[in-house]
Image: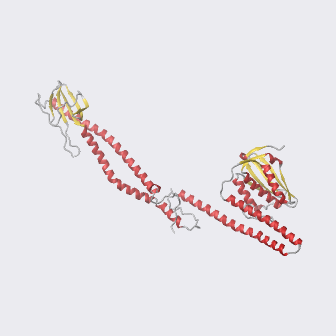
Amino acid sequence: MPSRRPEGAASEGEPMHSMRTRLFVILILTTGLVWLSAVVWIFFSTGSQLERVLDARLMEAARMVNSMVTRRALGNGEGATVPTIQTEPHPAYNRQLSCQIWSLEGSLLSQSADAPKTRLSERQQGFSNTVINGETWRVYTVDNPEAGVLVMVGDRVYFRDHLVNNVIAGVLLPALLILPVLAGLIWLSVGRGLIPLSRIAKELPMRQASDLSPIEEAGTASELRPVLKAINVLFQRVSQARDRERDFTAFAAHELRTPMSGLKTQAQIALASNDPATREKALAQIVVGVDRTGRLVRQLLDIASLDSGVEPAADEQFNAGRLLETIVGELTPHAGEVAEIAVDTQLLALELCMSPELFSLAARNLIENALHHSPQGGRVSCRLVENGVGVTIWIEDEGPGIPDEELARVTERFFRGRFRSAVGSGLGLSIVEMAVDHGGASLEMRNRPQGGFAAGIVIAQDKVRRQAAAA
């Protein structure tokens, strides 16, 4: 049966959802940008350097002709000619320098064979640009007052631009030819670099659902190690949650089996007996069993709710004393004459800002535990203790307490110590610890010097909104 792809997941063929394609595009664009920047830099740098080189050549040619004129190498009069000044022919740069010799009076004395008829420059000395017949010329003029002439040597700017373009083409052409090869190498390199990720992607689907062992990190790329550590931590948390659920189910089934068997037995006794006293005793035992089973079911539901990972209710401001009195009022009918429950009047002046549901859950279980461990006619006290960093609400009983060696384990689920009560299930203090932790408080426990056990809900000062002594 083919596996279903989750909604919103990218298929392997969707280009921009592939890490390999994304990296390939990024590298190609980055490389192209670098090359383009290099071409632009070469274009302007080469143009500037070429201008200086060709200007220097113009200057040298003009000075050479001027030197020849000075030595009268050209003879006198208008019939004198100027030898053609040219470069060696070259396929990419085939051109000639053009030379003109003008008298200071403005008459053309001589010129090279390819020179235009129009005066190359109106400037008397140095470099100038002139447009002749639609073409721009770069001209260098030498003023020779001794010989009474102006020597002008120039070349077309078109040839200069053509030379620069040839240089740029020489750079771009190899780049364009190499680009497909480079793209292929980048594609293969990226694929090679993603092999560790592909290995992990292939390994995970092959695992059994029950296999939550850590993924081996040895030999893995350093960039992937944080991902593997996060996955391994998740595996560990899932494994712990599964173990807790398995243990919870096993313990819950065991704890429910006993009272259910007892209820069935007492019901059979009540049905089979004709003695009213025996029947009444059996029915009373059924009521006790139903109470115990009901408390166990409620505690199991509370544990499941706290374990579900649902965000706790938002903090609210409430009066701790009045909420405790409400809980005591609900528990008193069930406590009977076992013990008296007293709420310190100072608690009536205590306003807290936390989840009232979580506080009520913790306080109810602490008071129930205290009642179940109290002797006949004992006293359960709810009192307030203040300190510099917050307040502590202590629930104290006069029972046997908890052996010191068991104090560290009393918050374990279904743990029932040496002095277990007849109706306890070993979940009360586990629920209290989880509730106060979710509510941003903490739990303290200790044996009382005068006998009995004390459990305190420690609340930080930032959750105490108003505190005043009772009148």
Closer-to-camera residue (200/86): 200
Q: Write the residue at 72% across / 49% down.
A: 354
Task: Pinpoint residue 361: horizontal percent, then vertical percent.
Answer: 74, 56
Q: Is residue 297 left or right of residue 73?
A: right
- Residue 45 in the image: above or below residue 443: above
Task: Pinpoint residue 20: horizontal percent, then vertical percent.
Answer: 45, 57
Closer-to-camera residue (77/392): 392
Q: Write the residue at 69% across / 61% down.
A: 304
Q: Which residue appears farthest toward the top when viewing the image? A: 105
Task: Pinpoint residue 422: horizontal percent, then vertical percent.
Answer: 81, 66
Task: Pinpoint residue 213: horizontal percent, then vertical percent.
Answer: 58, 65
Q: Write the residue at 46% across / 56% down.
A: 19
Q: Quadrant of residue 141?
A: top left
Closer-to-camera residue (317/183): 317
Q: Is residue 94 left or right of residue 78?
A: right
Q: Quadrant of residue 88?
A: top left
Q: What colour scheme was applied to this rendering of the protein?
A: secondary structure
- Residue 323 in the image: above or below residue 163: below
Specify the quadrant that holds the C terminus: top right
Closer-to-camera residue (255/275): 275
Q: How many marks?
A: 0
